[in-house]
Image (cartoon, helix red, strand yellow):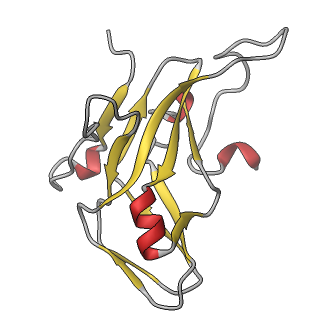
Amino acid sequence: MKTRGFEILEEYKMAAIELPQRKTGSSAGYDIEAAAEVSLAPRQVAIIPTGLKAYMLPDEYLGVHIRSGLSIKKQLSLINGQGIIDADYYNNPDNEGHIMLAIFNHSEVPVKIEKGMRIAQGIFYKYLTADGDAPGCGEIRQGGMGSTGV
């Protein structure tokens, strides 16, 4: 039985996408690569595809964080600070669960993201619920990024 991990999206199966890996024995984060070349215009947001989806238990989420070296050297950040990938984002009825990163370029020059460049780290987290609530209860997700706020 699968507990948590990453898979390559069907449309990216032939695109030479690497599954995220921890680089050392004590690394918390799994390095996530860009699935395509993207140019980030100065002071703008761009969406970078990863070609990945993540599966996990109902009481977990995948926290996505910009790699610190990339943020410092290239002045980049995730526009929402930390991406949160919910367990029900995986293979929901309207979306296979594509993890896409909204990255903001704080600098005055364009930044080129190359395919295969490690741009973020994913960390699996457990979360708690309030009294009278439980993981996996509630509405069924329909759609992709930002779909629960509509």
Vertical placement of residue 23 versus 80, above or below? above
Vertical placement of residue 43 versus 98, above or below? below
Vertical placement of residue 96 versus 4, above or below? below
Q: Nearer the viewer, residue 97 or 111?
A: 111
What is the quadrant of residue 126 in the picture?
A: top right
Q: Nearer the viewer, residue 87 or 14?
A: 87
Question: Is 93 left, or right, of 141 in this rendering?
Answer: left
Q: Residue at x 62, y 63 (%)?
A: 79
Can the viewer see residue 51?
no
Total tally of numbered discs in the picture: 0
Q: Position of residue 12 (x, y in %)?
A: 25, 51
Query: Which residue sits furthest right?
Result: 131
Q: Position of residue 50 (x, y in %)?
A: 35, 54
Q: Position of residue 31 (x, y in %)?
A: 33, 46
Question: Is 100 left, or right, of 12 in this rendering?
Answer: right
What is the quadrant of residue 122 in the picture?
A: top left
Q: Nearer the viewer, residue 97 or 69?
A: 69
Q: Residue at x 47, y 68 (%)?
A: 72
Can the viewer see residue 17?
yes
Q: Position of residue 77 (x, y in %)?
A: 54, 65
Q: Residue at x 70, y 42 (%)?
A: 148
Q: Residue at x 65, y 27 (%)?
A: 140
Question: Is 14 left, or right, of 79 in this rendering?
Answer: left
The N terminus lies in which quarter of the figure?
A: top left
